[in-house]
Each structure stands twice: as C-alpha cells, then as structure tokens.
Image (spheres, grey):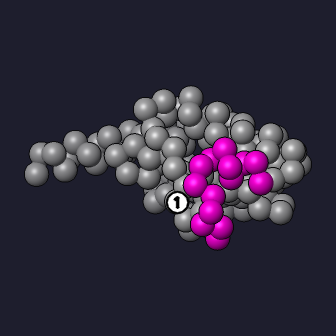
C-alpha cells in the first residue's frame, strides 16, 4: 500500500491511460450518484464517505475492484452473478465496459443505508 498517495487524482495518475480512463469513469459515476460524499484515500484506495464509508474502488492488473461494503454485495447478489465476487469485493474485468448503471445503483443504495444509520444514531 502506497501511503504517499493522498488524493484520488494522484491515485489515478499512477496507472496507464486505459486504466486511468476506467478509474475516472468509476469516480465520475460515484460522484454523480452521491454528490454530497467526500473523497479520500482509505486502505490505499479511492474512497467516498458520507456518514461513514460508502464505497471504495481500486485498480488491479486484470480488473477494477469495487467495494460497496458491508451490505452492497448482498443486496445486489442477483445481478452480480456474472462477476467474480468476494465477501466485500466485486471484480469488473479490464477490457469489458464497466457496469456504470449498476455502480450508480449500488452507491445510491449505500447512501440511503448510511443516511438511515446516521438518523438512527441521532435518535439514540
């Protein structure tokens, strides 16, 4: 994990142009789906935060990883069957178009969850 990377711009700049284009698509999609979220780097990955972590994404040799943890994968399991999925990760193969509509839906789902969780905490 490169701790010298402190911004999403710097993270994206460290990859080849084709990968930069995919990462930029992910970033823009997430920004549009969660306009009130703030950007940071967490666990060495681009991260969006709004009342807690919404999602992370990252580039690897053969895929773009997307992390809508902890519950995004469970809620969208039926539409994630064509991708390699781990407990908290989804791998979108490099060389295929990113499923940006799906990413947007998952981000919006996480925004609602985090908003509801924040409202519950205020009630306590």
Q: Residues within 10 Å of mark 1 (few under 14, many from 20)?
A: some
Q: What residue is rendered at 86% in x and 51% in y?
A: 16
Location of residue 23 in the rendering, given as x and y in whole percent from the top left corner: 73, 45
Nearer to the camera, 66 or 4: 4
Question: In which quadrant of the rendered view does residue 113 lie?
Answer: top left
Vertical position of residue 58 compared to residue 36: above or below: below
Vertical position of residue 70 compared to residue 37: above or below: below
Q: Quadrant of the N terminus?
A: bottom right
Residue 101 appears in the picture as rendered = yes
Q: Report whether 38 appears left or right of 25.
A: left
Q: Report whether 118 appears left or right of 25.
A: left
Q: Give the labeled residue for mark 1.
A: 42
Could you tell me which secondary element the residue under label 1 belongs to? strand
Q: Report whether 92 appears left or right of 69.
A: right
- So how many labels did they put on this image? 1
Q: Which portion, as a residue range, is magenta?
A: 1-14
Vertical position of residue 42 compared to residue 31: above or below: below
Q: What residue is rendered at 62% in x and 47% in y?
A: 8
Q: What residue is rendered at 58% in x and 55% in y?
A: 6
Is residue 98 found inside the magenta-colored segment of the image?
A: no
Location of residue 20 in the rendering, given as x and y in whole percent from the top left corner: 79, 45
Question: In which quadrant of the rendered view does residue 45 lie?
Answer: bottom right
Nearer to the camera, 44 or 65: 44
Vertical position of residue 80 compared to residue 99: above or below: below
Location of residue 40 in the rendering, given as x and y in whole percent from the top left corner: 51, 50
Location of residue 12 in the rendering, given as x and y in whole percent from the top left corner: 72, 48
């Amino acid at each position: 994990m490169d701790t010298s990377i402190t911004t999403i711009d710097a993270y994206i700049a460290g990859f080849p142009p084709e990968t930069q284009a995919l990462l930029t698509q992910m970033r823009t999609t997430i920004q549009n789906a969660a306009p009130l979220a703030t950007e940071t780097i967490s666990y060495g990955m681009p991260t969006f935060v709004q009342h807690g972590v919404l999602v992370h994404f990252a580039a690897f040799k053969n895929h773009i990883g997307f992390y809508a943890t902890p519950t995004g994968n469970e809620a969208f399991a039926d539409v994630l069957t064509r991708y390699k999925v781990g407990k908290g990760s989804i791998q979108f193969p490099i060389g295929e178009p990113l499923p940006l509509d799906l990413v947007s839906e998952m981000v919006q789902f996480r925004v609602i969850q985090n908003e509801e969780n924040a409202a519950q905490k205020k009630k306590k």
